[in-house]
Amino acid sequence: MVQVSSGRMGQRLTFAPLPPLVTPAEILADALPLLDPPSRISVSDAAERNVRIQVQGAWQNFDRMTTPYMVEPSDTSQSRLFKMGAFLGPSQSGKTKMLETVAFHAVTSDPGPVLIIHMTRQSRDVWVEEKLDPSILNSPAIFDRIGKGRDDSTFSRKRFRGMRLTIGYPTSTILSGGTYRMVLITDIDHIPLVMGGKDNPEGSPGRMALQRIKSYLSRGFVLLEGSPAYPSLDPNYKPSKEEPHKLPPVEGGIASYYNQGTRGRWFWECKDCGEEFEPCFDQLHYNAELSPGAAGEMAEMECPHCHTLVAHRHKMEFNRDALFGRGGWRHEAEDGSLCELHDEAIRRTSTASWALNGAAATFANWNELVTNWLEAKKRLEDLGDHVELAGVTYTEIGLPYQAEKDEDENELSLQFLKDHLQDAVRGVAPEWTRFVVVSIDVQGSYFPVQITAYGEGNRSQVVDRVDLTVPPEGAPNAAADEHGNRRRLDPGRYLEDWDVLKPYANLVVPVAGANYGLRPIGTVVDFHGGPGVSDNAEAFWKARKKAGQGSRWFLSRGQGGWKTPFRVKYEAPERGSNGKTARSIMLLTIATDRLKDTMHSALKKASGGVGALYLPSWMKDDDNMLGEFIAEERSGRTGWSKKPGVVRNEGTDVTVQSRALAEHKKLLKIDWAAPPKWATGGPENENAVLLEDLQTNDMGEVEAPKPKRRSRRAGRLF
């Protein structure tokens, strides 16, 4: 150690000893490997020789037999016949490890600059720290080549002898500059479709990546991988004989790159009949009549030629046999037949592409695959919610989601609704009602209000639907003029106009054939609207909370899109709009497109079924009101939107709000054999009020006895 005294009394600085001097001979010896010609060794061979991977906590040599289907895509990265490779497959199938082995080949065997693009900066840092760095440190041949300087190994750069490995995330800057022999992009479906801003789009990530390898001519290569995340744009799509492996058209992502390429699929050879077939989810044999778990346990792969069944324990054997010629990758030829990658008859394209079905993936389990699929399928049937089924399709099966065509799609028309109306008296809930919800939309000059009854089996029925247009007494400028005319409501301008909603908290809805009525379990009001609506909604809610009714009033906002990770959530906003401080309120945030799927499915169950939504007979002569429930159409790209020419859709909006509040109250988790007190049938319901106990106030309005105020638990803010 070297000790140096500073100018300050008694202070002593300690430094590590300086490194020994390096001779010119040692420097030359370290640099000589840079003069070696590229090794003529495939990526797979180099990986088995130089790369170590972690298996169940232990570091072992890379073994191509673990994921045999990755051998051809990895080795093709060194081909001079293709400029791009696109691998589509389910999650946890070895895709990212394939990119690592390709990058490490450039480190050990064929030095050249490589760029890896991850989804985001945060995901890149996590991947580098948890995956890439441990692989380098535990692979001696690779670790020996990395520089030992402070800046030689960072999150964004790894310097090796003779090459540099750059790790970035998708920005126009990194894809617009730099020269690389190889560009590797992971999870491309989670990268923007077009780089650059709205005013200066610069192109897709794949095309921009091709510009970075141009100076390397035929030696340059772009390799993309990902699981699909975009739905089919054509719900009726079916592959043709001329293009048997083509996937449905999608907006972008890995599936679109796959369709541009050679369209390879992984095949097995049947040991009984000798014919080849693709081991895909559609070929799994199981009894769909059983419960999802029981059906999954019996899942086996069926040969479509001789119908031989293959147990899951033989999957690895079939995958390894395919690597040695008993099956393997089969690509499309120009005439629609199947061929191998380097066959002269292959499709004329500069992109080699592969699509692996999740049923053949090494780390996929047929039991879990079938179980998850059937559970998601049941959720779709019960709720009309496609999200879970789409998730299984994307991440576990590895295909673009193609919603099944609804055979009765044309039946959900105005005439269909009229033909299935339920006999009802306006304002009276059906006899099976267990609880009531009031939902209120906000329009420029009126409040659309709907009362909905819910019962066992999650069925529901509209009890009443009105538009409040007249401001309450005492509101500014509410008095009639000399001609008897009064202004309409203005929710964005006058906070006092919101007082017309106050009676709905204690409203009592009579139950048909019973001597009692039910107060609503909650009243939900739209938080968004024209200028001033949100401010007035916040002030109104806070006033109701101060009056002791905070648990009975809710403010809602919608969040569209199919990737919303929830159906309903109730929480304080994290931040305000336009940089403002977040509001000190609670908001019921609704995944509107998902719940509109549910509403659409529920309307089609008007003849009965779990989760059915019934419309009442008193609507039969009001085509406009009925039309509000079918005012929107579904798009696999953008979600639900108004049909061309349709103006009003309030029936849809208030129904979605009502369903959201019911689900927030745990509608989907109710055990109807032992329901909570607010969902109990009969006068024992905690919201029940005997009709004989109703009182009339001084204005002649009927009102219920005020409910007892519940004691507030310590620590509860709302």
Image (tube, rainbow, N blue to C red):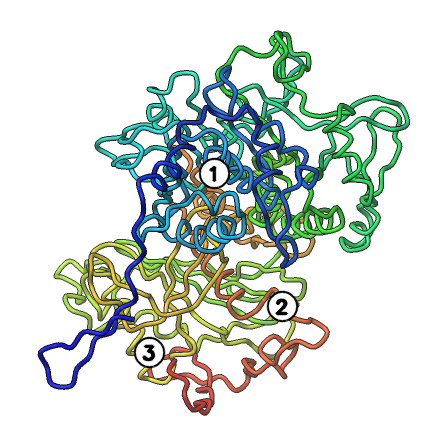
Residue 158's disc number:
none
Q: Label 1 sits on what residue type?
A: Glu
**Residue type, label 2:** Lys
Which of the 4 image quadrants contains residue 674?
bottom right
Crowd class of label 3 (few under 14; some 14 to 19; many from 20; radius 10 Å) = some
The residue tagged 2 is 669
Q: Is residue 445 above or below residue 355?
A: below
Kindly report the distance in space between the C-alpha atoms of the residues bearing marks 2 and 3: 29 Å
Q: Which residue does the numbered mark 1 point to in the structure image?
A: 633
Real-space Cα separation, disc 3 to disc 1, in angstroms: 36 Å
Image location (x, y in percent) of residue 215: 33, 19
Q: Is mark 3 on a helix, strand or loop?
A: helix
> Badge 1: how crowded within 10 Å, few (<14), some, or many (20+)?
few
Mark 2 crowdedness (10 Å alpha carbons): few <14, some 14-19, many ≥20: few
For this rendering, which residue is in front, 450 or 83? 83
Q: Where is residue 466 in the image (x, y as percent from the top left)?
A: 41, 58
Q: Earlier in the sequence, mark 3 or mark 1?
A: 3
The answer to whether residue 221 is visible is yes
> Image quadrant of residue 496?
bottom left
Report the side of 241 relative to 12 (left or right): right
Say what secondary structure mark 1 lies in. Answer: strand
In the drawing, does residue 96 fall left or right of residue 380?
Answer: left
Residue at screen point 68% across, 51% down: 372
Residue nearer the viewer, 306 or 641: 306
Nearer mark to the viewer, of 2 and 3 = 2
Image coords of residue 553 (percent x, y) = 39, 73
Tell me the quarter of the image containing the C terminus: bottom left
**Amino acid on which the number 3 mark rests in the picture:** Arg
Give the residue at mark 3: 544
